[in-house]
Image (cartoon, rainbow, N blue to C red):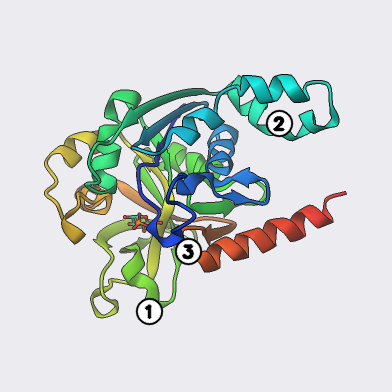
Amino acid sequence: MITKCLFPVAGYGTRFLPATKAQPKEMLPILTTPLIQYGVEEALAAGMQNIAFVTGRNKRAIEDHFDITYELEDQINGTSKENQLHSIRELIGRCTFSYTRQAHMRGLGDAILTGEMLIGNQPFGVILADDLCVGEPDNVMAQMVRVYEKYRCSVVAVEEVPLGEVDKYGIISGAQLDDEHIQIERMVEKPAPQDAPSNLAVIGRYILTPDIFEILRSTPPGKNGEVQLTDALQTQAAEGEVIGYRFQGRRFDCGSVDGFVEATNFFYARRAETP
Ligand code: G1P
């Protein structure tokens, strides 16, 4: 059973300035729900009720979101507005939340390593909240748990991206096991198109085995001078210990304005269809 999910949320969100000047990018809403809440809902529905955040300065709003807001709740208790708190109250009731801070922005790999004390020696999920995923019938993390149960090694969600965009992602290649699963052999962080081993990109969903921490400790800074999770995963991949999974569903890059608007339109249309 995988019960823990790690959310690295220390990043600045500079692509959304000035909106993210004084609030975390993870609190930007798609309709009325902040991005981070979609991520935590996905983790919980995949069986991961222990939520671990690697947070940073100016991210207090995330902690407050997953807590009771006493004065507000007291005011609206018993009114029709109370309904709007139903989803977050359910998460607060069913999950545990723990936090640690990443003091310096040294990359995703460093953020994951900072979370070690919250995770311990067990496999765990990782969700990057600005990749908003919709899976049918099961969400993407729940699909990945099934992949983990079959292969018992690290799993990364992958999808094809245009060749011109490979420099935004970790790019993989390897042996195709069947339509959905790839035994990864190579992983490169944000390669130039001419250096990319394929156009299969890792998106922000991972299941990691805990040996990743030891590997991260000895992984030198890579692309952009940051400790890259992709480089640590390459060490596991060289041992045949990483599966790439082509998930069923759709992913919106809510770290970009275009993806954010697409997600908004998608959820708005879906809400209009729901009776
Ligand atoms: C991170 C990872 C990258 C991955 C991407 C998915 O990059 O470093 O390998 O493909 O998330 O969203 P970031 O978007 O944080 O620059």
Res 155 seen here: yes
Mark 1: few/some/many CA within 10 Å (<14, 14-19, 20+): few
Mark 2: few/some/many CA within 10 Å (<14, 14-19, 20+): few
Tell me what residue is drawn at x 35 percent, y 63 percent. Answer: 169
Residue 205 - label:
none
Three-letter amino acid code at the position of disc 3: Ser
Q: Is mark 3 within 8 Å of ligand 1?
A: no
Q: Are marks 2 and 1 in contact (CB under 8 Å)?
A: no
Nearer the viewer's eye, disc 3 or disc 1?
Answer: 3
Q: Is residue 168 left or right of residue 224?
A: right
**How many numbered discs sit on the rendered protein?**
3
Q: Position of residue 100 (x, y in %)?
A: 33, 28
Three-letter amino acid code at the position of disc 2: Leu
Residue 164 - label:
1
Mark 2 → mark 1, Cα distance in angstroms? 42 Å
Q: Judge by depth and name the residue closer to the eye, 77 or 202.
A: 77
Which residue appears farthest toward the right when viewing the image?
275
Q: Which residue is mark 3?
A: 256
Three-letter amino acid code at the position of disc 1: Gly
Tell me what residue is drawn at x 39 percent, y 63 percent. Answer: 201
Residue 85 - label:
2
Q: Judge by depth and name the residue closer to the eye, 55 or 232.
A: 55
**Helix, strand or loop status at disc 1:** helix
Mark 3 → mark 1, Cα distance in angstroms? 16 Å
**Helix, strand or loop status at disc 3:** loop
Q: Position of residue 164 (x, y in %)?
A: 38, 79
Q: Earlier in the sequence, mark 2 or mark 1?
A: 2
Q: Is residue 146 left or right of residue 272?
A: left
Q: Is residue 84 above or below residue 154?
A: above
